[in-house]
Image (cartoon, helix red, strand yellow):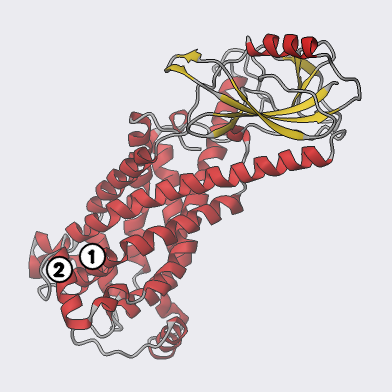
């Protein structure tokens, strides 16, 4: 029996497609064939024989998923045992003899090459994100201080430069960095968790789409349904937005007490001492639930904010990296044999972009997210700080906060109070953050999915 084959490799770390084939099947001559993508005319591409295909597929009268344990395979990383899952779809009723199947399996086994790529350890993204957050936030701490003070008060505010000068006169240089330790202790785990969750959910979404393609191939065995390699699946902007939003919400839940501590140290200087001293005082005065005051508004605000920032950054990076690679290929500076019309990888390396470009697209992504979600940021800060110190408890919900601000503080425009210093701090902070993240990630040998 001849088969159309979708072959999946399984090792101890991840489930991945076999090397390079987009759609693979067993040819009449017993060799593995590759069905290329459709051309511009919509017709299927030509077949080609694979030199490094997939492992054996046993014959069957119906679709099935089978596991095959191979002998130890040797690669650059050492010797290991590998398992392969083969999804086979029958194309004809002719059955092969056991000798024929054994011969076919042996010829295919001899050509197997383990993948060079591996799923990256999560700690690499965690460390890279944490360092990026600490360095970027420290660099713009004075602007962060002014922005937080403006958002937490109902009084009219002045130009943020004048505010900075006044803080320097009253409190000296330390006043411009008050709350920075708390900010760093908060942003390090927050950013690290965001990047880990973001990369994880991108992989899960791609894997879900891959299995959807496998199921379609099972339903339409004669339809030449192609199953892409996991690394070749291109996520949509919406999927990146959702992955980033989930990352933002997850990090907010885990690190929220540190966010409360940082906000109080900035808005109430002199009242609290240190990050953990602030948390102890807050629990003693208001109870444990005070550590999570305003959590729901924060989660609601973090979903669009982080999701939009990640989505804009990755879409810009991929678009510009692809254009740069195509331009280099057009003038003969790309990889040997590269064509300007060749399909580039789903996630081009950040090495393809200059430092200035990475800084710029990171800054743009952060500024877009901050501007779009600033009203939610103002609302959550008000809910966090009410009842603290001399501030009365006057808000019941996010909608109530918005209504009171619009009614009593100058209309919808008041929801954007503090946007100027916030955007001014986010612009360099986001740029530096993504640049440091890319540097650290590359230094650790990690790659974005």
Position of the N terminus, as image quadrant, is: top right
Residue 328 in view, yes or no: yes
- Camera-side residue: 161 or 120? 120
Dot 1 and dot 2 residues touching (CB under 8 Å)? yes
Which of labels 1 and 2 is toward the front? 1
Q: Is residue 243 above or below residue 44?
A: below
- Considering every residue shown, the one lying at the far right of the view is 93
* Tally of numbered tags: 2
In this picture, residue 397 sits left or right of residue 207: left
Q: Is residue 423 left or right of residue 279?
A: right
Q: Residues within 10 Å of mark 2 (few under 14, many from 20)?
A: some
Check the image and name the residue furthest to the front.
98
Q: Which residue is mark 2?
A: 167
Q: Which circle's residue, 1 or 2, is located before the other in the chain?
A: 1
At 45% from the left and 55% from the top, the residue drawn is: 247
Q: Secondary structure at mark 1?
A: helix
Q: Which mark is residue 88?
A: none
Q: Secondary structure at mark 2?
A: helix
* Residue 134 location (% of width, % of height): 25, 49
Tell me where residue 233 appears, x and y as whole percent.
Answer: 63, 37
Q: Residues within 10 Å of mark 1 (few under 14, many from 20)?
A: many
Identify residue for label 1. Answer: 145
Residue 441 percent location from the top left of the image = 37, 35
Q: Tell me the distance, in whole angstroms, between the alpha carbons under discs 1 and 2.
A: 9 Å
Q: Position of residue 291 (x, y in %)?
A: 27, 73
In-front residue for pair 384/204: 204
Is residue 160 in view from this perspective? no
- Look at the picture and state if 124 lies above or below 272: above
At 15% from the left and 65% from the top, the residue drawn is: 276
The residue at the point 47 percent across, 37 percent down is 448
Q: Is residue 333 left or right of residue 4?
A: left
Query: Residue at horizontal 68%, vertical 10%?
Result: 106
């Amino acid at each position: 029996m001849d088969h159309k084959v979708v072959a999946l490799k399984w090792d101890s770390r991840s489930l991945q497609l076999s090397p390079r084939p987009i759609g693979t099947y067993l040819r009449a001559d017993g060799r593995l064939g590759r069905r290329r993508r459709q051309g511009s005319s919509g017709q299927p591409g030509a077949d080609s024989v694979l030199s490094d295909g997939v492992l054996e597929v046993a014959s069957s009268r119906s679709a099935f998923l089978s596991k095959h344990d191979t002998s130890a395979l040797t690669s650059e990383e050492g010797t290991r045992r590998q398992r392969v899952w083969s999804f086979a779809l029958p194309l004809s009723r002719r059955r092969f003899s056991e000798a024929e199947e054994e011969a076919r399996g042996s010829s295919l086994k001899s050509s197997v090459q383990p993948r060079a790529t591996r799923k990256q350890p999560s700690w690499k993204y965690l460390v890279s994100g944490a360092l990026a957050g600490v360095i970027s936030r420290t660099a713009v701490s004075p602007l962060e201080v002014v922005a937080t003070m403006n958002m937490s008060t109902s009084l009219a505010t002045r130009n943020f430069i004048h505010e900075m000068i006044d803080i320097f006169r009253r409190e000296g240089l330390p006043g411009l960095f008050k709350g920075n330790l708390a900010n760093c202790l908060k942003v390090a785990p927050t950013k690290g968790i965001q990047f880990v969750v973001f990369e994880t959910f991108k992989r899960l979404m791609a894997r879900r789409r891959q299995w959807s393609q496998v199921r379609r191939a099972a339903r339409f065995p004669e339809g030449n349904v192609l199953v892409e390699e996991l690394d070749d699946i291109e996520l949509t902007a919406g999927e990146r937005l959702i992955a980033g939003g989930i990352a933002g919400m997850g990090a907010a839940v885990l690190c929220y007490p540190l966010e409360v501590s940082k906000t109080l140290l900035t808005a109430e200087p002199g009242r609290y001492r240190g990050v953990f001293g602030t948390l102890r005082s807050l629990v003693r005065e208001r109870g444990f639930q005070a550590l999570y005051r305003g959590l729901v508004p924060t989660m609601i605000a973090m979903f669009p904010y982080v999701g939009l920032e990640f989505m804009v950054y990755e879409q810009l990076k991929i678009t510009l990296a692809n254009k740069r690679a195509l331009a280099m290929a057009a003038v003969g500076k790309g990889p040997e044999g590269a064509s300007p019309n060749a399909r580039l990888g789903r996630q081009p390396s950040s090495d393809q972009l200059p430092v200035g470009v990475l800084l710029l697209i990171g800054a743009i992504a952060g500024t877009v997210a901050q501007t779009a979600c600033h009203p939610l940021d103002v609302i959550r800060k008000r809910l966090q700080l009410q009842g603290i110190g001399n501030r009365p408890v006057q808000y019941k919900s996010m909608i109530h906060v918005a209504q009171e601000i619009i009614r009593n503080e100058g209309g919808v425009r008041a929801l954007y109070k503090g946007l100027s210093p916030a955007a001014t701090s986010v612009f360099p902070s986001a740029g530096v953050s993504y640049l440091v993240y890319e540097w650290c990630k590359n230094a650790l040998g990690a790659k974005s999915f």
